[in-house]
Amino acid sequence: MMSNRHAPFSITPEGRIVWLKCFREAISELNISEDLKQNFWNYIDPFSNWIVNTPSRIFKIDGE
């Protein structure tokens, strides 16, 4: 399973967003139809939530 392959790595929600931005850029450079790009994106975006295995490192202290 994909989550097991990523288990040795700390993947935060913020890291997921960075990864998705890189992925979107790579997809945009492919010589395939926009429809195919969008269909793949519709799969990979929600799927990437399953890879997050570490809570967010952004936190707020009360009063700040």
Image (cartoon, grey):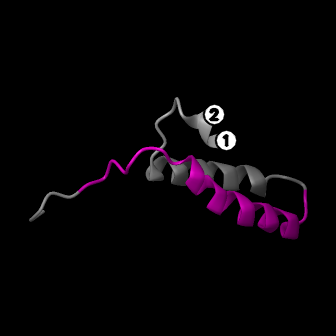
Neighbours of disc 2 within 10 Å: few (<14), some (14-19), many (20+) = few
SS under mark 2: helix
**Three-letter code, disc 1:** Met
Left or right for 21, reference 29: left
SS under mark 1: helix
Name the residue: 79% across, 52% down: 29
Residue 5 numbered mark, or none: 2
Residue 9 visible, this orientation: yes
**Three-letter code, disc 2:** Arg
Left or right for 50, reference 23: left
The C terminus, quarter of image: bottom left
Left or right for 64, reference 48: left
> Marks 2 and 1: in contact by CB < 8 Å?
yes
Left or right for 32, reference 11: right
Q: Nearer the viewer, residue 61 or 52?
A: 52
Does residue 45 sit above or below 15 in this rendering? below
Percent position (x, y) of residue 59? 25, 55
Name the residue: 53% across, 50% down: 16
Q: In this picture, which residue range is highlighted in magenta?
A: 32-59
Q: Is residue 56 magenta?
A: yes
Q: Is residue 4 magenta?
A: no
Percent position (x, y) of residue 19? 58, 47
Residue 2 numbered mark, or none: 1
